Image (tube, rainbow, N blue to C red):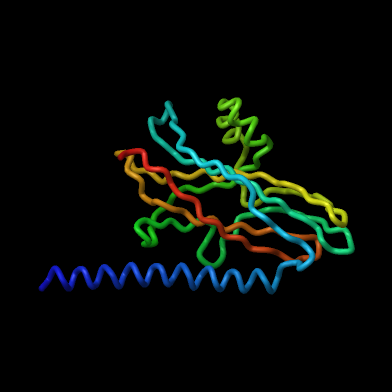
Amino acid sequence: MKNKQSASILALVIAAAALLVAVIALVMAHGARETARSDVTVEEGETLNLPLYDEEQDRFSYLILAELQITNQGAAAVKILELGRHDADAGFLMALKDEEVQSGDFQAQLYPLQHTFAEIQAQPRLLKEILKHQPGGHLSLNHVLQTGQSKTFRYAVHLTPYDADKRALADMVLISLRLTFDNGKTRVMRQGYPVQPLLP
């Protein structure tokens, strides 16, 4: 009887967590529609996710490389000021494991990414150069898009989703970012990325 009750409680917790994530995403999407420029489209491009091993600290971390393609479809030029962390609502990073929200500090940091994915794959040493940059709450873009123009911006998110025994503390992370334009309007985006396990 107790096992059935425990299973029922666990199922309710998982369902509640899934509902929470869905509600948060809906609220954020509604807010983005209200504040975003309708003449600008944002599309997610390539992503590259991989574990990193730090020999000095003898630990693994995780690096997410991603890109955004922004297009100005309006009749006037648009200036993009910055791409930054969105720390409001559910926060910059939400970690999930088996559909449950995980607490704890995953030490997530946002970095600029200057190289293309092809360059990084051809020269893996460039991965270490990414983390030599100073992480920040936002990345300054200050780029003007003329009518019909598109521009691809790349960024990296570094986090620690593994414990000392190399076990993954999450199987997915949701990253929230905010684009800021020169007219004061913003666009909030949330994207999920799988976390690769180190152990079978």
**Image-based side of 176 in relation to 200, left or right:** right
112 vs 171, nearest the viewer: 171
Residue 111: name its quadrant.
Answer: top right
Question: Observer-nearest residue: 74 or 27?
Answer: 74
| Number of residue marks | 0
Q: Position of residue 146 (x, y in %)?
A: 87, 54
Q: Residue at x 82, y 56 (%)?
A: 79
In the displayed structure, does residue 35 sit left or right of residue 5? right
For the N terminus, which image quadrant? bottom left
**Residue furthest out toward the left:** 1
Q: Residue 188: horizontal and vertical position, in percent?
A: 63, 63
Q: Residue at x 65, y 30 (%)?
A: 119
Q: Residue furthest right?
A: 76
**Residue drawn at point x = 50 percent, y = 48 percent:** 108
Spot occupied by residue 67 in the image (x, y as percentages of width and height): 64, 47
Image x and y of residue 53, in percent: 43, 31
Q: Is residue 15 above or below residue 71?
A: below
The foreground one among 28 and 151 is 151
Instruction: From this view, report whether residue 18 is shown above or below residue 55.
Output: below
* Quarter of the picture holding the C terminus: top left
Q: Say whether residue 162 is left or right of residue 30.
A: left
